[in-house]
Image (cartoon, rainbow, N blue to C red):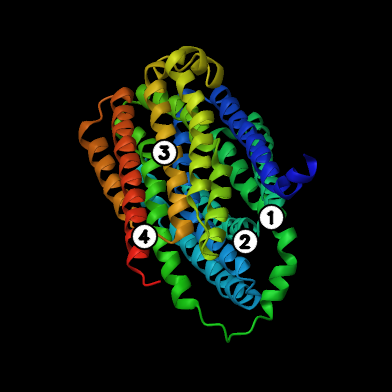
Amino acid sequence: MITRLRPHAGAIWLLAATTIANVLGYGYQVVMARLLRPEDYAILIALFGVLILESISSQVIQSATAKLTAQYRARDDEAALHAFVRRWSVRVVIAVAALAAAIALLSGPISSALALPTFTVVLLGVSLFFAGVLTFALGLLQGLARFGWMGSVLIAQAGMRLVLGILLVTLGFGVGGAFIGATGAVGLSLVVAAVPLLGLLRAARGASAIIELGASETRFFVFAGIVLLAYAALTNVDAVLARSVLAPDQAGAYAGAVTLGKIVLFAPIAVGFLLLERTSRAHARGEPTERALLLALSFVLATSGAVALAYVIAPAFFVGIVVGDQYPAAVAIAPLYGIAALANALLNLWISYFIGRGEMRVGLLLAVAVVAEVTLLLVAATDGVSVARIVLGVAIATQLAAIATFVFERTRERHATALTPR
């Protein structure tokens, strides 16, 4: 039994490490919900909504890096891997540094538009730089199947965020201190992620420039960017806009429900990491990819589905446990948001699968869903429950679109195979 499990030890550790990181991450949310006033906690949730938008956007880098790294590894093409790492490590650093500088320069208008303190918007730019470089490192670890180190990085980030956040808030720095802790944790976890990659980075520094895959790599990054940027917006724009479209008390209640929903959404994130690597490797070798997808969907439906069902059955109990009694209006929002978060957790798996196979049509569907959600939030949101209903409706429609895309792609593939001369 132990011998059979040994090859999967890294993957098992990643699942366990992600659980630990999620516990630490939600420990941070629970503590902050109690240390901060509801209106300040709503600001923190809005900040994290923007940061998650940034970090998931940065997962364009992670997912595309993991896909290409796993592909080169599956083909034993070390020269292409080293050339890829050399080329894109420089590009990523330059790109995210330029974007972070732009956010800092435009911090005034951005803070006014989102009703956020200017200082925290500058911190968002710093966080974006750290997150962009970190996700490139995580993508390399993911594509190389170094899941043990990957899990350790996630734990380090969540643990440092909790410790630094509590320390700074209790010292009187308020919501700004909470976010400073989060920013510092991303930077420190980048140091941890660099340790197992030093050998690869040294080899990449001397890579030959003969390998010319830059155009195809760039095209893949662009398409992956469309998909993941749309997913980031779809799953976080409601939290960002809540303070603009809702009254302060309703925004605070919605922030409490969002905290519960993120447990459903992010708990199975390691499954998406594993699915992307497995799908990329199998597809590069011409092997079937559907079994890993079905196993991943089943696992997330059983685990996150159980949590979402618990929110439906006993919302008041879980609102009291997670965010406390100062968010009574969140009780009516939590069941709707929990089901929406489940649909979006499953959508994350579909996206990992499509990216692993290089099938990017789903990006157009996600972009349409984002436009629909933003439009509905701006014209139809009246309270926290109405916002949750909008998010739920869009999440279900997008889930059905992902399933239809899967059926279309597989039908087209079988038809093409049948027409190929034997």
Residue 114 x %, y %: 36, 42
* Cβ atoms at labels 2 and 1 below 8 Å apart: yes
Residue beneath the point at 52% across and 41% down = 296
The alpha-carbon separation of the residues under discs 2 and 3 comes to: 25 Å
User: In this view, which residue lies farthest toward the front?
Assistant: 422
Identify the element where label 2 is drawn. Answer: helix
Q: Nearer the viewer, mark 2 or mark 4?
A: 4
Q: Nearer the viewer, mark 4 or mark 1?
A: 4
The circle drawn on residue 344 is: 3
User: In this view, which residue lies farthest toward the right?
Assistant: 2
Give above or below for 242 relative to 144. Answer: above
User: In this view, which residue lies farthest toward the bottom?
Assistant: 210
Identify the element where label 1 is drawn. Answer: loop
Identify the element where label 3 is drawn. Answer: helix
Give above or below for 255 relative to 159. Answer: above
Q: Residues within 10 Å of mark 2 (few under 14, many from 20)?
A: many
Q: Amino acid at mark 3?
A: Asn
Q: Amino acid at mark 1?
A: Arg
Q: Amino acid at mark 2?
A: Leu
Of 85 and 97, nearer the camera is 85
Per the image, the residue denoted by label 4 is: 413
